[in-house]
Structure formats: C-alpha cells, structure tokens
Amino acid sequence: MRETERIRHLSARELALFGMQDLAYVKQVIVNGVAGYAVHAADGTQIAVLPDREIAFATLRTHDLEPLSVH
C-alpha cells in the first residue's frame, strides 16, 4: 500500500498520534521566582526547564525534535 493510501486509512487514534514523537512544545514559565522555558513532549509530559528560549529550541533540534511555541 502506498504511503498516501496508508495515511487515508488511519484510525482516529492513529491520526491523533501521527508525528507525535517528532514534536515538543516550549512555553515560558516561572520556577521559584525565576523565568525559564518549560519543554513538554507532545503528550504534555514535561521534559525539562531551560533558562532561555533559544537554548530550548536549539536543544530540541539537536535531538531531532521540532519545537513549537505555546503562548
């Protein structure tokens, strides 16, 4: 089956998980009174808190993840 045909036949659950392992979300947070950037897996699991947005994005790209900002 061709890739496009396989994608057309994904279940709702499979579609929801599609690409999940390739994404990570970055949002500004305050931890102990200090601003930082929380990094979350696509399922919402917190991975890390880093001091700078650019560092967070660079770290994710180093690990072959696509960073997305959450506002």
Image: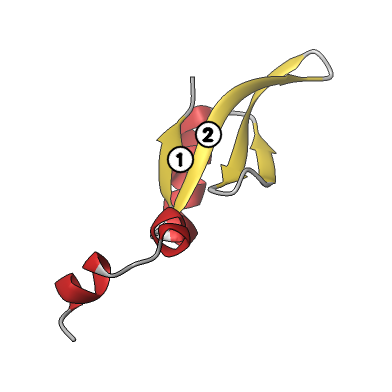
- Check disc 1 and report its element: helix, strand or loop: helix
> Residue 6: percent from the left, percent from the top?
24, 75
State which quadrant residue 35 falls in.
top right
- Check disc 2 and report its element: helix, strand or loop: strand
Q: Is residue 25 above or below residue 35?
A: below
Tell me the crowding category of disc 2: few under 14, some 14 to 19, or many 20 or more residues within 10 angstroms, Cα based: many
Where does label 1 land, which residue?
57
Q: Is residue 44 left or right of residue 18?
A: right
Q: Is residue 13 left or right of residue 28?
A: left
Q: Is residue 53 left or right of residue 1?
A: right
Q: Is residue 22 visible?
A: no
Where does label 2 land, which residue?
26
At label 2, the amino acid type is: Val
- Residue at image coords 43%, 42%: 67
Q: Residue furthest toward the bottom?
A: 1
Which label number is shown at residue 38? none
Select label 2 or label 1 by which is in front. Answer: 2
